[in-house]
């Protein structure tokens, strides 16, 4: 999962390959989209039908990551009743990742469909990071875990509650079977 998303340092856009005789505006946009020295990928997150879901994410130990965590932790965008909402961590994370870049979007960037995510972030397909158990997938219209997906995620499910204990037991048994299969294949 890490190599799939961090190995590609090129930002996705509709700009296409460079052409001889491009206008100075397109050349400037190309430099903004594809800097000479791409940023190191430091965070891989997934989104679902409600936006960013930070239940499972991968982070590199980097200066950018340390600064991001400090900004996220000390974010003051939520005030009043919404401050203690059970998804406030997700909305503040999304704000920290998207606000600055979304404020710099201009017509040229928009026409090229340049990314809003900061260069240090990659958004993984949900099955590559955190597919949901059936009940949550149906409720939020997102991907239900299938064999071959990376992690079966149980958002909002507390390990000490009886219905959730069964979900965690099933996930544990799947993990053990897959680990044993890998070990058997390696020793064969």
Image (cartoon, rainbow, N blue to C red):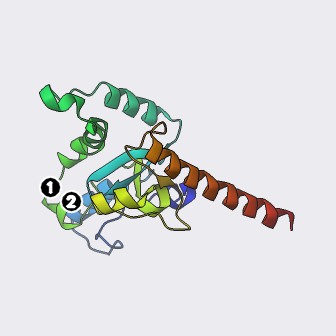
Q: Residue at x 42, y 53 (%)?
A: 36
Which residue is labeled 2 in the image? Answer: 109
Q: Nearer the viewer, residue 55 or 162?
A: 162
**What number of labels is visible?**
2
State whether residue 24 is above or below residue 21.
above
Circles 2 and 1: CB atoms closer than 8 Å: yes
Residue 112 location in percent, x, y? Answer: 23, 66
Identify the mark at residue 106; answer none if there is no mark: 1
Q: Residue furthest front?
A: 162
Residue 75, located in which quarter of the rendered image? top left
Q: Quadrant of residue 147?
A: bottom right
- Looking at the image, residue 105 sits to the left or right of residue 122; the answer is left
Q: Secondary structure at mark 2?
A: helix
Percent position of residue 32, x then y: 30, 54
Where is the C terminus found, in terms of image quarters? Answer: bottom right
| Alpha carbons under labels 2 and 1: distance apart | 5 Å
Position of residue 179 measured from the top left corner of the image (x, y, whole percent): 70, 57
Q: Is 28 placed left or right of 157 in the picture?
A: left
Q: What residue lies at 79% left-to-right and 67% top-to-bottom?
A: 185
Work out which quarter of the rendered image holds the N terminus and state it. Answer: bottom right
Residue 119 location, x and y as percent? 38, 49
Q: Is residue 144 above or below residue 90?
A: below
Q: Is residue 10 visible?
A: no
Which image quarter: residue 111?
bottom left
- Asked which secondary structure carries label 1, the reply is loop
Q: In this image, 6 relative to 55: left or right?
A: right
């Amino acid at each position: 999962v890490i190599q799939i998303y961090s190995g590609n340092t090129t930002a996705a856009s509709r700009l296409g390959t460079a052409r001889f005789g491009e206008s100075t505006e397109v050349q400037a946009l190309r430099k903004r989209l594809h800097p000479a020295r791409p940023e190191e990928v430091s965070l891989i997150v997934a989104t679902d039908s409600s936006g960013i879901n930070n239940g499972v994410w991968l982070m590199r130990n980097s200066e950018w990551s340390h600064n991001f965590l400090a900004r996220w932790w000390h974010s003051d965008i939520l005030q009043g009743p919404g401050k203690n909402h059970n998804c406030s961590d997700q909305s503040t994370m999304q704000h920290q990742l998207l606000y600055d870049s979304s404020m710099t979007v201009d017509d040229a960037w928009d026409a090229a469909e340049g990314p809003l995510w900061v260069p240090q972030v990659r958004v993984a397909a949900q099955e590559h990071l955190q597919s949901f158990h059936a009940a949550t997938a149906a409720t939020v219209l997102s991907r239900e875990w299938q064999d071959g997906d990376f992690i079966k995620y149980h958002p909002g499910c507390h390990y000490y509650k009886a219905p959730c204990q069964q979900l965690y037991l099933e996930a544990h048994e799947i993990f053990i079977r897959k680990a044993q299969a890998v070990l058997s294949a390696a020793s064969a």
